[in-house]
Image: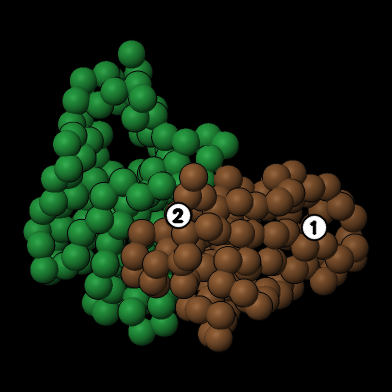
Chain colours: A green, B brown
Amino acid sequence: QQQVKQSPQSLIVQKGGISIINCAYENTAFDYFPWYQQFPGKGPALLIAIRPDVSEKKEGRFTISFNKSAKQFSLHIMDSQPGDSATYFCAAYLDSNYQLIWGAGTKLIIKP
Amino acid sequence: EAQVTQNPRYLITVTGKKLTVTCSQNMNHEYMSWYRQDPGLGLRQIYYSMNVEVTDKGDVPEGYKVSRKEKRNFPLILESPSPNQTSLYFCASSLAAQETQYFGPGTRLLVL
């Protein structure tokens, strides 16, 4: 119930392509869904976030799609660039215990 | 510069030798948290602190202690480290629990 399942574990995309990372959850009490980006040797940094009353949020080349009925959300990176190569984490916030539950991460490599 | 600092960045120790990893933030954040990051498991929360008066266990608190005597500092204490605590540790802070978390640079710990 507390888990957030993230897929794929790793992803290789050609420069200019679309990168898609998926997450699924069970607990309908989650009410905030951020995505964090982590470069090697650094801590994660917030990329984009969405609340369940919104089906899509776009910031530049990054878009979150949210499907409340399916309990799934995904990150789309349009026109992927080598600088996007990083590990991406989805997460879900549970207000009842003030915890952020994290997916296992996706290592994204953008090939030039 | 607004930041979260952790020390040390790297630490090699032996089983049973008490150690402390310090964490400090200069953003006047109320919420602070410790995570460990292990390959394939994402980030798992060890402890969190809503403010100087409230500290609670996360998902993996066994073998760890924390204290929050002042707002800016949130040290992580391993009273008797064991090899299964070898990991990459991150401290994070935010204005409140559901707000954007800002991460420190990480502490890589090896327990022999």
| Place of residue A39 in the rendered image (x, y in percent of width and height, measured from the top left) | 47, 36
Q: Amino acid at mark 1?
A: Pro
Residue of label 2 = B102
Identify the image quadrant of the N terminus of chain A: bottom left
Task: Tell me the residue at 50%/79% (across/down).
Answer: B51
Of the image marks 2 and 1, the number of the one nearer the N terminus = 1
Residue B58 seen by the camera: no
C-alpha span from label 2 to label 1: 28 Å
Q: Is residue A63 above or below residue B52?
A: above
Q: Is residue B24 above or below residue B109?
A: below
Q: Amino acid at mark 2?
A: Tyr
Task: Tell me the residue at 22%/35% (across/down).
Answer: A77
Q: Nearer the viewer, residue B31 or A89?
A: B31
Near mark 1 (Cα within 10 A), the count class, few <14, some 14-19 or many ≥20, is some
Helix or strand or loop: what does disc 2 sit on? strand
Residue B100 is labelled as none
Q: Chain of mark 2?
A: B
Residue of label 1 = B83
Q: Please state which of the two labelled residues, at mark 2 or mark 1, is closer to the viewer.
A: 2
| Place of residue A79 in the rendered image (x, y in percent of width and height, measured from the top left) | 19, 25
Task: Tell me the residue at 79%/47% (across/down).
Answer: B11
Helix or strand or loop: what does disc 1 sit on? helix
Residue B95 seen by the camera: yes
| Place of residue B47 in the rendered image (x, y in percent of width and height, measured from the top left) | 58, 73
Tell me the quarter of the picture where residue A58 sits. Answer: top left
- Left or right: residue B82 compared with residue A106: right
- Left or right: residue B90 compared with residue A55: right
Identify the image quadrant of the C terminus of chain A: top left
Q: Are marks 2 and 1 on the same chain?
A: yes
Near mark 2 (Cα within 10 A), the count class, few <14, some 14-19 or many ≥20, is many
Q: Is residue B18 above or below residue A80?
A: below
Tell me the quarter of the picture where residue A32 sits. Answer: bottom left
